[in-house]
């Protein structure tokens, strides 16, 4: 009985010696994976922040473009009014313009 127990204890020792390096290697892998995951999470958060900044910048750009478009439309209207006013003044100064209009 003592022999069997001694043999069993030796086998357990041998197995522990084989398993310990594997456990250590697995612990190292877990630590490496943990660090990798943390870095990926940080990169993802940075990406979300950058995406938010880009979205905000595009909104500001859209607002600026909208303002510029409104100014251009206003300028176009003023230019058309000016052209009309100029034509009216030229027509008033040209005595033949009324005769042409009557034809």
Image (tube, grey):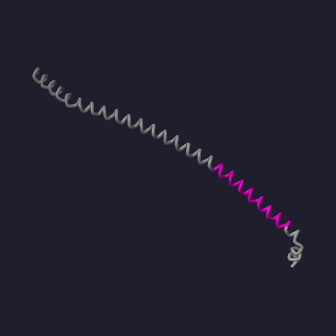
In the figure, 54 relative to 19: above or below? Answer: below
Residue at horizontal 68 percent and vertical 53 percent from the top: 68
Q: Nearer the viewer, residue 54 or 23?
A: 54
Q: How many marks?
A: 0
Vertical comparison of 100 with 41: above or below: below
Question: Which quadrant of the rendered structure holds the N terminus?
Answer: top left
Residue 5 shown left or right of residue 24 in the figure: left
Hey, which quadrant is residue 91 in on the image?
A: bottom right
Front position in the image: 82 or 74: 82
Image quarter in which the C terminus is found:
bottom right
Q: Is residue 56 left or right of residue 39?
A: right
Q: Residue furthest bottom?
A: 103
Q: What's the magenta region?
A: 62-89
**Residue shown at the point (67%, 52%) measured from the top left:** 66
Asked whether, in this view, residue 7 is left or right of residue 63, the answer is left
Q: Position of residue 72 (x, y in %)?
A: 71, 56
Q: Is residue 74 magenta?
A: yes
Residue 79 is a magenta residue: yes
Q: Position of residue 28 (x, y in %)?
A: 31, 32
Residue 4: x and y in percent read 11, 24
- The main secondary structure of the magenta stretch is helix
> Which residue is found at the position 13% from the left and 22% from the top?
6
């Amino acid at each position: 009985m003592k022999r069997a127990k001694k043999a069993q204890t030796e086998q357990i020792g041998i197995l522990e010696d084989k398993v310990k390096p594997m456990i250590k290697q697995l612990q190292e892998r877990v630590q490496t994976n943990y660090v990798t995951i943390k870095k990926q999470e940080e990169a993802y958060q940075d990406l979300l922040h950058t995406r938010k900044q880009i979205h905000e910048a595009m909104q500001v750009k859209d607002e600026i473009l909208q303002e510029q478009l409104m100014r251009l439309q206003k300028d176009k209207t003023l230019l058309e009014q000016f052209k009309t006013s100029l034509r009216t003044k030229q027509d008033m100064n040209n005595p033949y313009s009324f005769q042409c209009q009557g034809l």
